[in-house]
Image: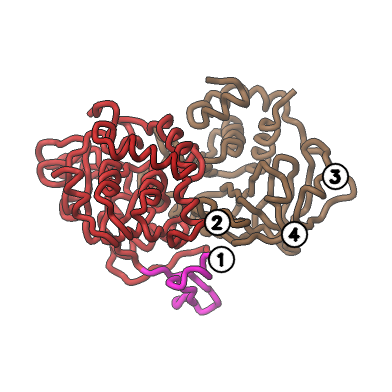
Amino acid sequence: MYAREELLACAVARLIGEARHVAVGAASPIPAAGALLVKQKNRSLRLSMLHKRDGNPFSEGSRELFDLAGQGRIDVFFLGGAQIDGEANINLVRAEGRRFPGSFGSAFMYAVVPNVILFREEHSPRVLVPKVEFVSAAGDPKALLTGKALFSWQKERRRFRLESLHDGEDIRSLTGFHYDAPAVVPRTPAPSTGDLEILRGVVAREMAANYPDFARRVWGID
Amino acid sequence: MTPVELAAQIPDGARIALPPDYSMPAMAVVRELILQKKRNLRLLGVPVLGMCADLLIGAGCVAEVETSAVSLGEAGLAPRFTEAAEKGEIVVRDATCPAIHTALQATEKGVPFIPLRGVLGSDLLKQRSDWRVVQNPLESGTDPILVVPAISPDVALFHARWADEAGNVWVGRRRELATIAHAAKKCLVTYEELRAGDMLEDELLAPGVISAAYVTQVASAPRGAWPLGVAGLYAIDDAHLLRYARAAKTRDGFEAYLSEFVCTPEKSSSPAPSPA
């Protein structure tokens, strides 16, 4: 038995792969858990948790992340969106008359970080739309991971390809954009016993410091 | 000098550079701007804004925000910003974080514009007639690049851990505060605690100092960032932020919050003394 968040963290860890430097933002507990899992197995990984209140990795203020990324010193970054479309555009500004917080650094990071992973837990036609109402940022992501599926990005075809489903549920009607898919769609691998042990031990404890609500909900840690 | 006197130096219509909620906003002055009924302020988020902007917007002090985002972080959307933007009550000039940092650095260097990678393909370009995409003049092959104009705010407003007798302030690693101090025409700073002497003569403190050359005026405000925090001294009051986020979801709730925590003098500051 494992939680869906644990499966997603393991999927994130596989996407991070052999990266040297991963940066993770504030609203990203699952990417953070995935990155911490990788860190346990690859001690040379540099992991910058942007919002750490104590022991923040930066000493040049909030511009340092962008300066690092602009130089190519960050290999992996995560972006989300109120809307994500079939051309991998993301929208963090407005949709259906509603105003969202804003684009943050996405318009820059999407272009300069070589491996951008789009992550949004909600997999619905409301989020995954044919065309975003506002393009906060455009780029070529490495993958799109949702609470139900993993897509790869086909740069030449400018189209997503379904790689795996987390629980086998058909997602056609939940996905507002067209995508390619193999005849038989594999299941996203379940977390290994070893990964679950790491997640529930050292990762859970580290997560509690910076994502207390998440650690409480998933692992019952206070 | 007091937060009241600092606020009095900010005229209606001023363009004010403000730090994010995690980078020592001068909340005591923000409350005072509301009490002094400032109008048509133009807020610049460096690079994002949070509770301090939401309070000013809800209180009717703001005409325009230029920022990469406005949010209460873990506490969710900034409700007064969201409503004002949806109803078109304020002008929102959407940006992206490094564009704001870079545009302020252009002012630090005294140059009129500065290039920035990325952003091409974003609808931000359609909205920002002041941003231009140009051909890299040093490259013979095609290389389009964004240039943004230098930003020079009227006022930089923030809180500091220390001020000293020489007029310097210490902000530690929060270097975006140094950037706005360097770029603004006027720099107003509240501080937690006054130190004797000159911090620039202390080799360990000096790297975290903003020199008095940039600082226009300072005012004592113990726990002046509350309900936000000062790293290493007191944390963000998360419970209070959550309470604000809930209250401000409605206009009535916001007014009730204002009357309890902004307009009532005995409650308009931190519930605890400064640990400094």
Asked if labels 2 and 3 touch by Cβ distance under 8 angstroms, the answer is: no
Residue beneath disc 4? A159
Residue B222 appears at what percent x and percent y?
A: 22, 34
Q: In the rendered view, does B51 fall on the left or right side of B178?
A: right
Residue beneath disc 2? A93
- In which quadrant of the rendered view does residue B271 lie? top left
Residue beneath disc 1? B123
Mark 3 or mark 2: name the one nearer the start of the chain. 2
Assign a secondary structure to mark 3.
loop
Residue beneath disc 3? A185
Q: Nearer the viewer, residue A91 or B266?
A: B266
Question: Looking at the picture, do discs 1 and 4 lie on one chain?
Answer: no
* Of the two numbered discs 1 and 4 in the rendering, the one whose residue sits closer to the viewer: 1
Tell me if residue B204 can be seen.
Answer: no
Q: Amino acid at mark 3?
A: Val
Q: Which residues are magenta?
A: B122-149
